[in-house]
Image (cartoon, rainbow, N blue to C red):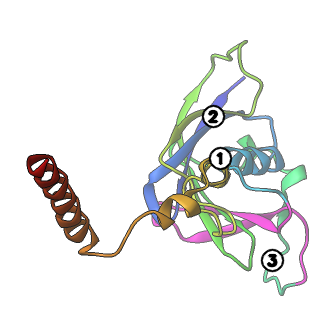
Amino acid sequence: MAILKFRIYLEEDDAVYRDVVIKHTQNFQELHFAILKSYEFDSKHKATFYRSNDNWQRGREISFERYDKPYVVEPLLMAEVTIGSEIRDTNQKFIYEYDFEKHWVFLVELINVSKEESSKLTYPAVTRIEGIGPQQYGTKSLLGDKFTDIEEKYDLAEAAEGFGTEGDDADTDADEEEAADDSTGQEDDF
């Protein structure tokens, strides 16, 4: 049985990618869910694959379902099409689009074919994660919920109130020196 390794790049940044291994007998729907899981996206939106050439031009569509849009050619359905049936050469490429409103586009490239199946893996499996993936809805910072936890634990808003404005430190230092001089002067007078 052939094991296919795909590298899934974020279209906007090829330094961010995930490697996914999948059996050639598994279908595109399984690859679809593996990609979403590897980038920590939910599965609430529409999705489709396109067979591609070396120039990343969109070819035959392999869709999650038939959507309300005009088709030149009816798409194949992910659940019905095995990965192996769409491999035309050893560096086969696909374009994967998720969430047609946000237009998340991923470039999927076959990077390795092997016959050795690992007993340690459940296919499909993510074997490599490179770079920080984007936030699906773009509302969280790179730290996500972790920063909120830190903020609540240490109450950073209160800590920020303790800082004065520019120039306050110089006045404080001068006042402290005067107080020290006054106390020294009083000891001398006694």
Q: Position of residue 60 (x, y in %)?
A: 71, 67
Q: Position of residue 50 (x, y in %)?
A: 68, 64
Magenta-drawn stretch contains 52 = yes
Instruction: Name the amino acid, label 3.
Output: Val
Residues tagged 1 and 3 counted as in contact (Cβ below 8 A): no
Count of numbered circles on the image: 3
| Residue drawn 13% across the image and 56% down it | 181
Instruction: Please give the label number shown on residue 73.
Output: 3
108 sits to left or right of 73: left
Whichever of callouts 3 and 2 sits on the residue coming sooner in the sequence is 2
Q: Residue farthest to the front?
A: 190
| Residue drawn 83% across the image and 50% down it | 29
17 sits to left or right of 97: left
Label 1 crowd bin: few (<14), some (14–19), many (20+), radius 10 Å: few
Say which element carries label 2.
strand
Whichever of callouts 1 and 3 sits on the residue coming sooner in the sequence is 3
Instruction: Please give the label number shown on residue 4.
Output: 2
Label 3 crowd bin: few (<14), some (14–19), many (20+), radius 10 Å: few
Label 2 crowd bin: few (<14), some (14–19), many (20+), radius 10 Å: many
65 sits to left or right of 7: right
Instruction: Name the amino acid, label 1.
Output: Lys
Whichever of callouts 1 and 2 sits on the residue coming sooner in the sequence is 2
CA separation, marks 1 and 3?
56 Å
Magenta-drawn stretch contains 66 = yes
Q: Position of residue 120 (x, y in %)?
A: 71, 14
Instruction: Please give the label number shown on residue 99.
Output: none
Looking at the image, is 30 positioned above or below residue 115? Answer: below
In this picture, which residue range is highlighted in magenta? 44-68
| Residue drawn 50% across the image and 46% down it | 91
Say which element carries label 3.
loop
Instruction: Name the amino acid, label 2.
Output: Leu
- Which of discs 3 and 2 lies nearer the camera? The answer is 2
